[in-house]
Image (cartoon, rainbow, N blue to C red):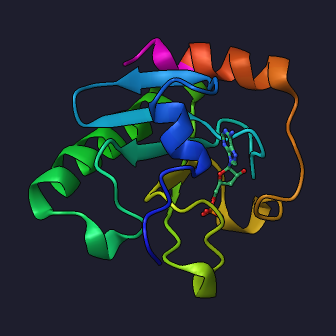
């Protein structure tokens, strides 16, 4: 999978389309998934242009995973999540739809998840959950 500079997350990184941002630093961005598989479903992406886990250098990955940790801790403290599913799809063969490396953080039990990318969520609810998670970031 080659990197497509017009993928939707590249556009979010360039500020060309909006997102419900919860955290940003020099290396990564965290924002809400608009088709949540459970309330509080967040995404963490590196600023580095990688399509899958195989294309990101280790130092960039370390920064990204540090953000994954921070967001997970915030989901636990602010949403009271008892557990968080961490999911990451590599390539169309795995069902990846957006061609920029991303980590899904879904604060729910695996058995309770809605279907992947199936239904747009309630934007007001997503916005409110974003504000709540951001309190700890
Ligand atoms: P994947 O199938 O692993 O590539 O996941 C892509 C995810 O991006 C899905 O869960 C979508 O709901 C989510 N998504 C697609 N477009 C947007 C967007 N504009 N803002 C936030 N999340 C999005």
Residue closer to the observer: 9 or 104: 9
Q: Is residue 114 magenta?
A: no
Residue closer to the observer: 78 or 42: 42
Residue pictured at 47% horizontal, 78% vertical? 1
The prevailing secondary structure element of the residues shown in magenta is loop
Q: Position of residue 126 (x, y in %)?
A: 74, 26
Q: Position of residue 18 (x, y in %)?
A: 64, 23
Query: The magenta stretch spans which residues?
Result: 133-137
Residue that sits furthest to the bottom in the current view? 93
Residue pictured at 40% horizontal, 17% vertical? 136
Q: Position of residue 85 (x, y in %)?
A: 54, 58
Residue that sits furthest to the left in the current view? 59
Q: Is residue 84 at all visible to an observer of this figure?
A: no
Total number of numbered labels? 0
Quarter where residue 97 is shown:
bottom right
Q: Is residue 62 at all visible to an observer of this figure?
A: yes
Residue pictured at 67% horizontal, 22% vertical? 129
Q: Position of residue 135 (x, y in %)?
A: 46, 11
Q: Is residue 129 above or below residue 8?
A: above
Residue that sits furthest to the front in the current view? 5
Residue closer to the observer: 42 or 132: 42
Q: Is residue 35 above or below residue 124?
A: below
Residue pictured at 35% horizontal, 61% vertical? 50
User: Horizontal placement of 57 versus 18: left or right?
Assistant: left
Q: Quadrant of the C terminus?
A: top left
Q: Is residue 136 magenta?
A: yes
Q: Is residue 131 above or below residue 126?
A: above
User: Horizontal placement of 126 versus 17: left or right?
Assistant: right
User: Horizontal placement of 50 versus 12: left or right?
Assistant: left
């Amino acid at each position: 999978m080659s990197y497509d500079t017009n993928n939707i997350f590249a556009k979010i990184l360039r500020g060309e389309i909006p997102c419900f941002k919860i955290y940003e630093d020099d290396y990564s961005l965290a924002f809400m998934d608009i088709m949540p598989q459970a309330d509080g479903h967040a995404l963490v992406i590196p600023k580095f242009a990688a399509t899958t886990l195989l294309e990101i250098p280790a130092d960039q990955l370390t920064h990204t995973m540090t953000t994954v940790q921070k967001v997970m801790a915030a989901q636990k403290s602010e949403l009271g999540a008892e557990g968080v599913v961490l999911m990451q799809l590599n390539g169309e063969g795995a069902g990846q739809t957006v061609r920029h490396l991303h980590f899904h953080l879904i604060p729910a039990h695996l058995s309770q998840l809605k279907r992947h990318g199936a239904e747009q969520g309630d934007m007001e609810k997503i916005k409110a959950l974003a504000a709540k998670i951001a309190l700890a970031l």
